[in-house]
Every structure is written in C-alpha cells, then in structure tokens.
Amino acid sequence: MTINIDIVSEVELHEPVLMAAWPGMGHVALKAYVYLYEALRAQNLAFVEEPEFFRLPGINIQDGLVQATLLPQSGFYYWKHPGGSGDILFFVGDQQPVAGKEYQLAEALLTFAGSLGVKRVITVAAMPTAINHYQDSRVWVTATHEELLSELSPYCDQVLREGQISGMNGLLLGVAKQMGMEGFCFLGEIPFYTTEIENPKASKAVLDVLIKVLGLEISLGELEELANQTEKEIDHYLLELQQREQEEEKQTEDQDGPVTVH
C-alpha cells in the first residue's frame, strides 16, 4: 500500500536535515519540535492523512452533539536558512501509527525526505531516570555512526551506549540507517514518575543542545517559563496522588475491620 502525501507547496531545499517527532513519554519530542518550527515560522509543505495507519480513540461531543470524526493529521514543514544553507525539513505526527504499520510509514516518510535532499535525520525522545522534577534534565545522545556520535558527544551529558528507544522517535533512525542515511537522537531526562505528564523542562534541555549543534539563534524563554509552571503542577499532581492513596488505604482498612492481635 502506498502512502498519500499531499504536497501543498513546491520548494527547493539546500542540504536539509529531517527533524521528525511523534507523541511519546513526557511529550518531550513533540513539544520541542513544535516549539522550534513555530519559533522559526516554518512553512507548510505537505500533509499525510491515512485512515489505515491510525486508531481513532473515540468521538468528541460538544453541547450534547456528536462532532464529525477527524483523522489524526501529520505534516511536513520547511524552514530555509537565511544564509542559504542548512535548511530544515520538519515532520510532526499527531499520533503514533497502529502496530504493524510503523516500518511502512517510516520508509515512506524517509523516501519523500530523501527526494528533497535529506541525508541526515534528527529525532528526540525522553529518558526516564531517578531524578526528581526540580533537577535539571541532562541530555543523552545516540547516533547511527560512530563518527557522528564522536562529533555530538561533547555537546551532551551522556552517551546512550545500550538500551532501546520505543515508538517512531526511535524506529525512524533505524530505518534511516538501513536506507543509507545517518542520524542521531537527543534524549532529555524526565523523572520516571512523570512519563504521562508533559515535561517542557526536558524539551528545553534538548533544544538548548540542538540549537548549538545547528547554529540557530532561538529564544527559549517561553519554554523555560512553561517548565517552571509545570514543576508546580507536578507538585499538585503528586499531592493529589498521595491523598488518593491514603483514602484508598483507609477504605481498605474500614472494609477489613480492626485487626486483633493475641
């Protein structure tokens, strides 16, 4: 099955890199790339809309009425470097594809990117560790080739020598290497207890490194402010979780009755 890529504008890119992201733990990748392409004011290039690749979670209801079903929409965006080199091709996916369709989607996206001159792929992911949500997020790196890893490791805190990156944020690099491209992934640390909570601090940590590598000048002030707000929200979340656990324990004790010791 071929994937329909609806091209909305024609453009020639000079030495572009592909920066692709999908939802993942802490929304680290998606938050980072959406922030970056909005800051650069990237332009629409193409959209990908394939019903067989995505699972619809349900329907939305507003004012008592069922709303029309909308498929998750993924898109390509481009930014041309004002200096004439180092253009960026973004791909942002609203949703991870259904199981069994990942390789086919990755291959189609990389084929399209390759037709625009892309030879290097950059992804981002989360790295759950034992840090707390007030600690700075360190940035880890892994790459498709040893030479590239040596080039990037001075910018990062740690090299991911062993492990696994789940989902499309990881798989895309493996397919890229198989297709003769090079690439790397920056992983931002998040507390292991916040994998389901958006973590802009980790997204900012990744972007701090990425803009140095790419030689970009982008203000991350808004992302830093959001990170500070999120710290307080996590405090509130943990407090609610603790209270809920205490209530559940009390209910269990009430149901079991008093314990008699002889």
Image: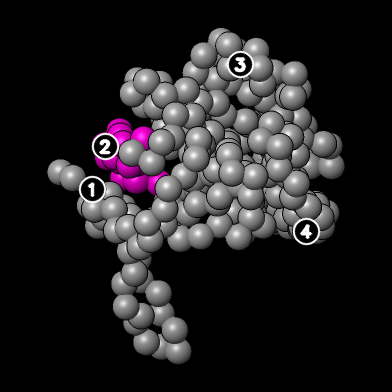
Quadrant of residue 118 within the rendered picture? top left
Horizontal arrangement in the rendering, residue 223 relative to residue 122 (left or right): right
**Mark 1 vs 4, N-terminal side:** 1
- Residue type at the position of mark 3: Leu
Please tell me the numbered disc located at residue 222: 4
Check if mark 3's residue and mark 4's residue have beta carbons within 8 Å.
no
Q: Which quarter of the figure is the C terminus placed in? A: top right
Q: Which residue is mark 3?
A: 149
- Residue type at the position of mark 4: Glu
Horizontal arrangement in the rendering, residue 230 relative to residue 143 (left or right): right
Q: Nearer the viewer, mark 3 or mark 2?
A: 3
> In terms of secondary structure, where does tag 4 sit?
helix
Category of crowding for the residue at label 3, using alpha-carbon neighbours closer than 10 angstroms: few (below 14), some (14–19), many (at least 20): some
Q: Is residue 166 magenta?
A: no
Residue 77: x, y in percent?
A: 48, 54
Residue 95: x, y in percent?
A: 42, 52
Q: Is residue 35 above or below residue 182?
A: below
Q: Identify the residue at horizontal 41%, vertical 80% (top origin).
A: 61
Q: Which quarter of the figure is the N terminus placed in? A: top left
Q: Identify the residue at horizontal 71%, vertical 49% (top origin).
A: 200
Front residue (pair 126, 1)? 1
> In terms of secondary structure, where does tag 1 sit?
loop
Quadrant of residue 87 within the rendered picture? top right
Q: Which residue is mark 1?
A: 3
Q: Which residue is mark 2?
A: 104
Instruction: Measure how far apart labels 1 and 2 are at the Cα level.
Output: 9 Å
Q: Is residue 101 magenta?
A: yes
